[in-house]
Image (cartoon, coloured by chain):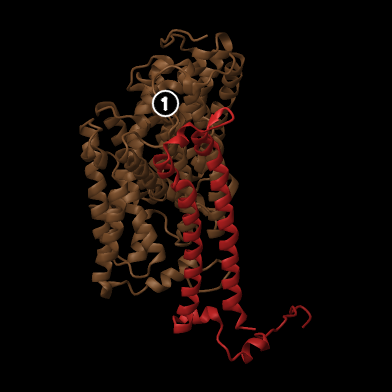
Amino acid sequence: MNDIPRVRVTGPPRRRATTTHRSGTREIDAGTELGRVYMESLLREQLRLALRILGLLALTVGSLPLAFHLIPGLGEVRVGPLPLSWLLLGVLVYPWLLTLGWLYIRRSEANERDFAALVEEVER
Amino acid sequence: MSLPLDVSTDVVPGSVAVVLVTIATLAIGTWGLRFSRTTSDFFVASRTVRPGLNASAIGGEYLSAASFLGVAGLVLTFGADMLWYPVGWTAGYLVLLVLVAAPLRRSGAYTLPDFAEARLGSRGVRALCSVLVVGIGWLYLLPQFQGAGLTLQAAIGAPSWVGPLVVALVVLINVGSGGMRSITFVQAFQYWLKLTALLLPACVLLAVWAGDGAPDPTIGAGAGADFWSLPLGEGGGQGLYVTYSLIVATFLGTMGLPHVVVRFYTNPDGRAARRTTLVVLALLGLFYLLPPVYGALGRIYAADLATAGSDVLVLELPRLMVDGLLGEALTGLVTAGAFAAFLSTSSGLSIAVAGVLSQDVTGRIFGTHRLSGVSAFRVGAVIAVVVPALFSIAGPDVGVARTVGLAFAVAASTFCPLLLLGIWWRGLTAVGAVAGLAVGGLGSGLAVGWTLVTSETTGWVAVLLGQPAAWSVPAALATMVVVSRATRDQVPAHAGRFMVRLHTPEAVDVER
């Protein structure tokens, strides 16, 4: 009798059995209208963020050729020993791109956390 | 201070550098082989590469001959508007980060054709994508091999077919034996080698330049100091078009390059894919500070090269500015870096092309025989390397940066629209994708063919065909949208489910 090891018998958590709401993740899995709304909101937020970052990129870096085309005098502006164009395109543009990337990662991960909280909180 | 321009007959530093880089590459590749066991190791290093290592590997693979040699030469000849090449090649990663990185990793596909098939459920789209991957890969491999020939010619006076042969052999041994897992270590090593090989000589050369009283490169020899500091092409409207078209091609083309995309599948998850991309942005930005320095110094010390073979500027400048042993040592270092550039980029591209070939061509059943996953990959690697190597020896000589620029334009006109719409728009259909790929591929392909056979660069026709991205990308995008709209009853039934897989963070427990 003693050599039969003890086995702990457990059941599913009670809380889950009494849940009447369906969680957001299950709405998405079942492809319901509500699940669709959840997904649409995530996609919209992420796309809006991406377009904001790209808009900023176009406005700052992308407008440079046009600016130098429209204002020819800019080609002769110098900052210390460097021509302005070299300072902008040879040096400053790289930390700026890195900053934009860092901003994007912070915001997109925040969006994903919000989404996770949204679809999982219904369960509680 | 400046010596007469002749290619030195002293071949010692160049030879030593090439041999050392080759040995190091093979040694690290063999060491990495210990970790390569499965087909998944071969294709995607079993998806377990950490962001730091992965970013170094991406940097190592991405910084090709065009970055190491081409940019400095272009800046020397044409001035500040050529700075758009490195800026675009870096900004391309930002665009990739915000639009593609995490969803692409979460798609769980091995290659671009895999992604297309999984998203659209169509064998036809898959076949077309495979053809495009192989085409872009070969177009990009061609200048790498040609650049290798050029470098060995300048460094050790070898005939121009030796470079392609050596690079092809080393790549084949590494790729064929260890696949993605072992190549990851090789690539990471080669990023740091390339950075050192440009950084150390640049510091010495800048010291020499300061010792000479820091002459101003913009007033140096050669005509047109003002055009040299103007960041857009010459010729008014045409120059503006060329510059913006280059921006479109490089900003959007990066995400469509086969060897860039295949690297994203080696990340453990979507979050790591994003972090990897951010580190890549930092590494590329650091590296690209250097080539313009060579371009500017070249204007003072090697102005003759601007018209005669500017691609060798980086290789020749140390010898022209520094005498004696130090000059030779620095020459050896830049030669090593250049050789690493050919090896790493060629390896990455060969892996991408071999991966596609082995899935769609060499892995098929021939008669009663079918190759195993790893054998099919090896046969694919041989085809991937040999074809462009032969073409680079026999074919016409096109500028390194120019051919790479065309590869970017084709990638931007085909895979960029497919990825953007595939990831962000549920309504994309297989018919729409095929139509858009055909329009973008034919448009930019026509431009490539035209550039390879002519050398005309003036007039609107030449400008539009020489730099096609600004019209071919919108045309492909619009075609995909319009045709998908017209065939909206054919939107794949699983499109919604696939969107869930692409965009939900891994922490959320949904069916994928």
Quarter of the view holding residue B211: top right
Task: Kindly identify the residue that appears in the image at 49 percent across and 74 percent down.
Answer: A41
Q: Colour of chain B?
A: brown
Q: Which residue position holds label 1?
A: B73
Quarter of the view holding residue B391: top left
Whether residue A42 appears in this view of the structure is yes
**Closest to the observer, A45 or B41:** A45
Task: Kindly identify the residue that appears in the image at 34 percent across and 57 percent down.
Answer: B417
Provide the secondary structure element on which disc 1 rests: helix
Check the residue under mark 1 and report the chain it is in. Answer: B
Q: Colour of chain A?
A: red
Whether residue B335 appears in this view of the structure is no
Q: Is residue B443 left or right of residue B84?
A: left
The image shows residue B304 at horizontal and vertical percentages of 39, 15
Q: Residue furthest right?
A: A2
**Closest to the observer, B186 or A95:** A95
Task: Kindly identify the residue that appears in the image at 56 percent across and 8 percent down.
Answer: B324
The image shows residue A64 at horizontal and vertical percentages of 45, 43
Tell me if residue B243 comes above or below residue B121 in the rendering. above
**Closest to the observer, B159 or B411:** B411
The image shows residue B357 at horizontal and vertical percentages of 32, 48
Q: How many marks?
A: 1
Quarter of the view holding residue A33: bottom left
Q: What is the three-letter code of the residue carrying label 1?
A: Gly
